[in-house]
Amino acid sequence: MASSPMAGKTMRAVQYGGYGGGFAALKHVEVPIPSPKKDEVLLKLEAASINPADWRIQKGIFRPFIPAKFPFIPVSDVAGEVADVGSAVKDFKAGDKVVSVLSMKNGGGLAEYAVASSSLTVHRSPEVSAADGSGLPIAASTALQVLKSGGAKFDGTGKPLNVLITAASGGVGSYAVQLAKLIDLHVTATCGARNIELVKSLGADEVLDYKSSDGAKLKSPSGKKYDAVVHCTAGIDWSTFAPNLSDNGKVIYISPSTSTFLNYAIKKLTFAKKKVVPLFAVPKKEDLEFLVGLVKEGKLKTVVDSKYSLSKAEEAWAKSIDGHATGTWYLQRFKELTD
Ligand SMILES: NC(=O)c1ccc[n+]([C@@H]2O[C@H](COP(=O)([O-])OP(=O)(O)OC[C@H]3O[C@@H](n4cnc5c(N)ncnc54)[C@H](OP(=O)(O)O)[C@@H]3O)[C@@H](O)[C@H]2O)c1
């Protein structure tokens, strides 16, 4: 078997050595460039996006299964150029521009190169920038899967729905608003006052400031009852959602707590019409292809909060932990680094 053209070379990466420690535990290191296995592609990374899951993994939320081992190079959402391919890979060749979701267990995104499964890698045309592409894997896929779980259809067969999207200024919410409007759903959104204009510009029909008393009640200003709630934040009681739901309304929780699961079980056992749905998105190649296609056609955009070079990764990490992202955090194109 021919060895990788990168074999024996090293790259810059950012990693941590154990659970906890936040941004201060991130270390800049020089490590060997990984080699792609049979079904993998080696990517020269141009952009990576940080999601809350990335620093929650560092906090130990999936302990002891994820990360697979320490030291761990975090971050799974990336865009870049194929540098090498494994022996069984037929769909990609060196030089192809792509978007990939790396395995959560093995991570790898905070580095100059990373290996990705070819089954979770999609082509990216020149219209799709690395920044736009790298935001899609977790955040936009989750938005898509939550909307579908709420009854939205993207094949033209859907019926009109009223949806509420909480934290519409965040990574998932900012995509959810755009995807919902693409298929003409009526969107009520919540966000902080500073982001109201942004969320309107993404297409939301009505926007509530979550810190206002109307916003806290989640009541639609036009009196709509919600068929589905894309619930992207935490700390809102069922008793707040219930009076605002249509008869068969569903609240889809992407940050479910123990009480969410308890409420889910109660609703199931009592055949309640209004439903609680805890949802963990699963990365799918067809979703990623659909989303990259929408970006290419100019129908979906990534709201980029801030850009950082790899050398400033800890700043991006700290800001994401802070929880006030507008859209997604994005690390600067590594190949253009001058630092
Ligand atoms: N289940 C899954 O598969 C899945 C997938 C992706 C993400 N998630 C989870 O979903 C959550 C959202 O992820 P994300 O990437 O969208 O987060 P994010 O980008 O960090 O969300 C931050 C945004 O939420 C807003 N916000 C915070 N509290 C709010 C509230 N009570 N009402 C309205 N807006 C509020 C903030 O606005 P201000 O700055 O104005 O406060 C900020 O703009 C995270 O907990 C994440 O772990 C789950």
Image: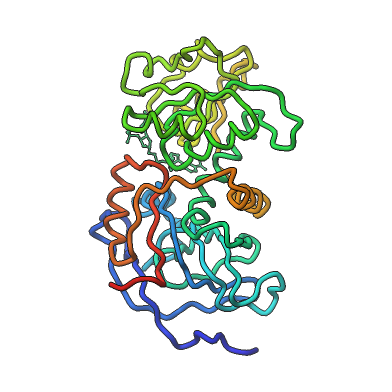
Quadrant assignment, res 268: top right
**Between 248 and 192, which is closer to the camera in this rendering?**
192
Residue ID at (68%, 73%): 89
| Coordinates of residue 83 in the picture (x, y in percent) | 55, 77
Furthest residue to the right? 157
**Between 4 and 175, which is closer to the camera in this rendering?**
175
In the picture, which quadrant includes the N terminus? bottom right
Residue ID at (46%, 26%): 189
Is residue 314 visible in this depiction of the protein? yes
Judged from the image, the quadrant occupied by ligand 1 is top left
Q: Is residue 323 above or below residue 230?
A: below
**Between 317 and 95, which is closer to the camera in this rendering?**
95
Q: Is residue 108 above or below residue 261?
A: below
In the picture, which quadrant includes the C terminus? bottom left
| Coordinates of residue 33 in the picture (x, y in percent) | 45, 79
Quadrant assignment, res 308: bottom left
Query: What number of labels is visible?
Result: 0
Residue ID at (34%, 78%): 30
Side (left or right) of 293 relative to 190: right
